Each structure stands twice: as structure tokens, then as C-alpha cells.
Image: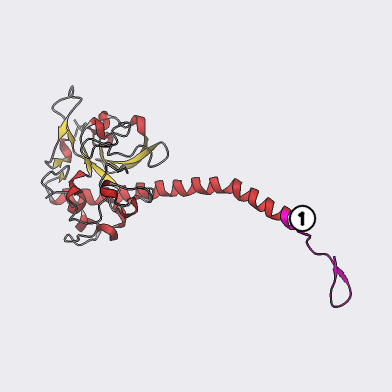
Amino acid sequence: MYLNFTGTKKRAFTLIELLVVIAIIAVLLAILMPALGAAKKRVYTVVCLSNQRQIGMAANLYSNEYNGKVPRGDGSLTLVWFTCFLPYIGQDSSITDYRQVDIYKCRAFPRTGTGIGGVSNSRQTIGYVVNAWDFQNSSDTTGFETSVPTKITKLRLPSTTAYLADNEAGTWRPVLENISNPDRGRFDFFKNDHLPMSTNESDVTNGRRIARDRHADGCNLLFFDWHAEHMKAEDITTRIFRGR
């Protein structure tokens, strides 16, 4: 309590009261921060699904001009999916720097850690990998890599066959900023070791390529009917990539 210039008494905060208020604010923040963090992650999931749907629209436009076909894997590096779709997402087909292509990025991709050669994950521009997996028949559980564009109408169940998935981050995975990266052909998947539940985390060729926990307990996938959805890691198995 103190006297102001008029001589009347006025109550002021004591140090203890101030500390109590600060403590209450700290407790409220501690309660709210996890909820805010969870909300932020949910926003990232929704944005990622939106990105995949836009890529799906680009893939559909591409297929309309190329006899109903879409690119898959490409060892020759001439039909890499994210290069093929550039004109259909409002970008110049000759672009070499992918930092300006927002829909190819997943905001939940880690900003910490490094990829091959110690390159920071914060420089990653391609947040997705494409299904380059084909099979000899219905009993084939191993499959093989295909570099041949696929005609969508030849897929038996396009609505349950995944085309794109969240890209894994790790020291065995390439971080791509531009077209000059020789590992630009590794943004696909075509074997069991590439699946989310794979424990191979050291091999650039055979290491896990589909993210295990990009969004909560799994990742987002784009399907050949161009809808996108979230799936748990343990549910992402060979069956959703077979196509026929």
C-alpha cells in the first residue's frame, strides 16, 4: 500500500502476489502448449493432404495428355515424377531449383537432422516418394522396380492403390534442392525394405523410404483415383501398392 500525490491510499501488488500470478500463467502455458503443439501437427497433416491432392490433379492433367499414363520410377532420370508435373502446377518445365515449389514440400518434414552427405534436412524440397512397384502376378510378394509409365485404366483398383507417400528422413536418404542432384531418382519405392515398418536405416538403395511417423503414427498417401488419406504405418503393406 502506498500514498499517491493526492494523499489517498492505493493498493499495489506485493512481490509474493506478483510471483503467484507468474506461476499461474506458467501453469496455464504448460497446460496449453501440448494442445497448441497437437493442433499445429494436425494443421501440417491437413496441408500435406492438400498438397497431395494438388499433385493428384497435376498427375490427372498429365495423364490426359499422355495417353492416360503417369510416370512411376525412372532409373534413367528422364521421367522423374516431380519434373513431369511442373507444367501442371503452374511452374516452368525447365525449372531446376525446387525451393519455390511449395506443394512438393511437407511442412511436417523434420527441420533438424541430416540426410546423405550431412546435408541438412531443412533444405529438403521433395517431401514425397512415388510408387514404382510392379508385380508379376497376384502371388508375387516381392515385386520389382518399374520405370515404365502406367496407364491408370489398367489398374484393377485405383482407389485402393497408392501412388504417392510421405518421404522418410534419415542419414541414408537424399536431400534434394535442385535437378543437378544425382540422387533425384531415389524419390520412389519398390520393395519391402522401403515400407514404413522396415528397420533398414543405413542403405541408400534398400533403406526405408516411406515415412514411418511423419503424421502421428503413420503418413499420408495419394491414391490412383487422386484422393489422399492418412494411414497407420503398420497398415501400409504391399497390398496397397499392387495395382493389379
| Relative horizontal placement of residue 4, taking residue 147 as reference (left or right) | right
Give the image's coloring scheme. Answer: secondary structure
In the rendered image, which quarter is residue 73 located in?
top left
Image coordinates of residue 184 in percent, x first then y, are 19, 49
The range drawn in magenta is 1-19
Crowd rating for badge 1 (residues with CA inside 10 Å; few <14, some 14–19, many 20+): few
Indicate whether 162 appears above or below 87.
Answer: above
In the rendering, at what x and y percent does residue 150 appear? Answer: 14, 40
Residue at the spot x=17%, y=24% of the render?
A: 140
Could you tell whether 88 is left or right of 2 in the image? Answer: left
| Quarter of the image with the N terminus in it | bottom right
x, y percent for residue 26: 64, 51
The residue identified by callout 1 is 16
Q: Would you place residue 136 above or below residue 177 in this image?
A: above
Q: Is residue 131 above or below residue 178?
A: above
Expressed as whole percent of the image width and height from the top left, the position of residue 174 reads 25, 47
Depth order, front residue of 126/169: 169
Quarter of the figure that contains the C terminus: top left
- Farthest front residue in view: 118
